[in-house]
Image (tube, rainbow, N blue to C red):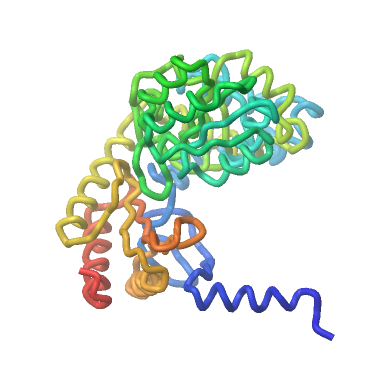
Amino acid sequence: MSGKLDWIDEELVLLKNQGLYKTIRIIGSANNAQIIVDGKKVLNFCSNNYLGLASFPRIKKAAKKAIDKYGVGPGAVRPISGNMLLHEELEKELAKFKKAEGCILFQTGYVANTATIPVLVGEEDVIFSDELNHASIIDGCRLSKATVVRFRHNNPEDLKKLVKENKNFRRKLIITDGVFSMDGDIAQLNELVKVAQNFGCMLMVDDSHGEGVLGSHGRGIVDHFKLHGKVDIELGTLSKAFGVAGGFITGKKKLIELLRQKARPFLFSTGMSIPDAAACLEAVKILEKSDIFVKKLWENTKYFKLRMVKLGFDTGKSQTPITPIMLKEEKLTQEFSKKLFQKGVLATAIVYPTVAKGAARIRVMPSAIHSKDDLDKAINTFKEVGKELKVI
C-alpha cells in the first residue's frame, strides 16, 4: 500500500524539473563581505546586512555585556513577565530615531505585519494593497479577514480609482512596501499620502528595506520624503540594515497602546532576546550619531550598478542597493547562480514563487563593507559567467 505522503516525492521532483527547487547553503562564519559557505570562502552578495553591522565590534560587545547583566532570554511573554529594561530603552530610541510618538517591538518584521494589520481592520473593512507587497503583508491581510483590493504596482492613480469605487466600508487601510524587496524600486509615498488624506484612509508603510538606506542617517522612506506625522503606521525591521533580528511599529502613542492590548504575537509569544535587544539598541545609537555607513553603502551601490549596466546586464527598475540582474528564465538563473558560486561569488537565484514566472533574477546586494576590490571581483565574475551562458 502506498504511503499517505508519497505525493510529496512527486511534488519535489516536479520542483526540480521546473528549476524551482531551492538549495539552502550552510554558512560557517560571521556575516561579513567574505563568508564561508558549504566550506568554501566566497564573496557575500546576497545578504540584507546593508551596513555591515551584523559583525560590527561595538554591537557584539554590547550583546555580550547585556548577557552578563541580564542573561539570554526574557523568560515569558512581556504582558506576563513584564518588559525588560532593554526593551523599553530600545523602543524609546527607535521612536526618537524615526521621529515618531511611540514604538512597539515584535520578534521579526514578518510578525509585526501579521500582528498589526488584524488589529487595524476586520471583516467590515477594506485594505488597498500594492500588488507587489511582501508576503508578510499579504499574510497579515488574510489574517485580518478584511476585503483586500489590490492596486497596480506603485500606481497612485489606480489606487485613487479603486478607493473611489470602494467607499462603503467601515475603515479603509492603504498598505505598501517602502522599498520593494525584489525590484528595489521606491514607493511613491508622497502621492499615497495625498490619496489617504483626501479619502480618509489610514496609511501603513513597511519600510524594512528603507531603514539604514533612505533618509537622513538611514531613517527610512518617511524621512526621505519628509512626511513625518503624515504616515499613520510605519513598520520596520531590525533584521536587515541594523544587522540583528526583530521588527517594530512606530506611530501615534494611542496606536502603540492599542497594539500592546490587542496584537496577538505581542500577547502570546515571548519577546526579543536579551542579546538581540542590546545589539539593536547599540545599532540605533550608531546610526543616530553617524551616517558614514549609509554614505558608503550608496557609494558602493552606484559603483556596482554603473559597471553592471555598462556590461549589458538588465538591472530592472531598481532605485536602491537591491540590484536585480534580470535573466527571466528559471533554469538559466539557477545555472548562473551556481557558476557564480563556483567562481567565488554568492548571489542567489530568485525564482517563482518568490517572483512571478518568467521574472527570475539574481538579486545582488552590495553593502557598506564591500571594498572596491570586492566589487570589482564580483563585476568581473558576472562578466565571465554572462559570456559563458551567452547572457551578454
Quadrant of the rendered structure where residue 375 is? bottom left
Q: Is residue 253 something that shows in the picture?
A: yes
Query: Percent from the top left, x then y, of residue 168?
Result: 60, 22
Along the viewing direction, whichever of 26 and 203 lies nearer the viewer: 203
Query: Percent from the top left, x then y, of residue 177?
Result: 46, 37
Q: Quadrant of the C terminus?
A: bottom left
Q: Is residue 64 something that shows in the picture?
A: no
Residue at 42 percent across and 40 percent down: it is: 152
Above or below: residue 214 compared with residue 103:
below
Above or below: residue 50 compared with residue 251:
below
> In the image as oriented, which residue stretches furthest toward the left?
310
Residue at 56 percent across and 15 percent down: it is: 252
> In the image as oriented, which residue stretches furthest toward the bottom?
1
Query: Percent from the top left, x then y, of residue 371?
Result: 26, 52
Residue at 50 percent across and 69 percent down: it is: 20
Q: Quadrant of the N terminus?
A: bottom right
Quadrant of the rendered structure where residue 109 is? top right
Quadrant of the rendered structure where residue 171 is? top right
> In the image as oriented, which residue stretches furthest toward the front?
165
Q: Is residue 107 left or right of residue 317?
A: right
Query: Percent from the top left, x then y, of residue 206?
Result: 49, 34
Along the viewing direction, whichever of 50 and 234 lies nearer the viewer: 234
Above or below: residue 49 compared with residue 246:
below
Along the viewing direction, whichever of 116 and 339 lies nearer the viewer: 116
Above or below: residue 344 compared with residue 247:
below
> In the image as oriented, which residue stretches furthest toward the right?
1
Along the viewing direction, whichever of 2 and 72 lies nearer the viewer: 2
